[in-house]
Amino acid sequence: MHSTLDVVRAQMQEAEPILKRLDEELEAINFDPTVPSSVDAATEKVTAIIDTLLASFKANPILGPLADQLKYQYLDSIQHQVASAQEE
């Protein structure tokens, strides 16, 4: 019988290539934090990419919250860049 730790390890190994692809796609998003339409487009892209690539994680009790946290972090980063640009 597999232990919980074995199951988690297997899930993380399965998720690794997806998370790598996610990182690559999100890093490729460029936007101008001073242009609202650019910010909106970047926000939509981030949401779409994360929702698409991590859709299979949603029902997973371990990876589901990770997907939500990643989305929050990337969207928060966009907002931080907007706020920083407005301060300049």
Image: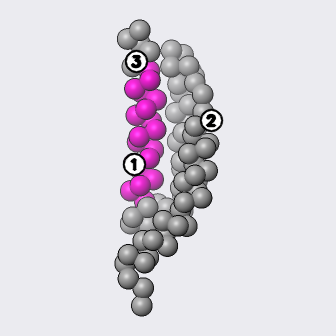
Q: Is mark 3 on a helix, strand or loop?
A: helix
Q: Is mark 1 on a helix, strand or loop?
A: helix
Instruction: Determine whether label 1 and label 3 are within 8 Å by CB.
Output: no
Residue type for callout 3: Ser
Q: Is residue 7 left or right of residue 36?
A: left
Image quarter (top left, top right, bottom left or bottom right) of the C terminus: top left
Residue type for callout 1: Gln
Provide the residue designation for mark 2: 28
Task: Report, in whole angstroms, how far the alpha carbon at label 1 lies from the one at label 3.
Answer: 22 Å
Please tell me which residue is depicted at 42% across the width and 85% down the height of the picture. 2
Q: Is residue 6 visible?
A: yes
Q: In this view, does 3 lie to the left or right of 18?
A: left
Q: Quadrant of residue 16?
A: bottom right
Provide the residue designation for mark 3: 84
Q: Residue 21: image x %, image y %?
A: 61, 50
Provide the residue designation for mark 1: 69
Q: Residue 9 got which mark?
A: none
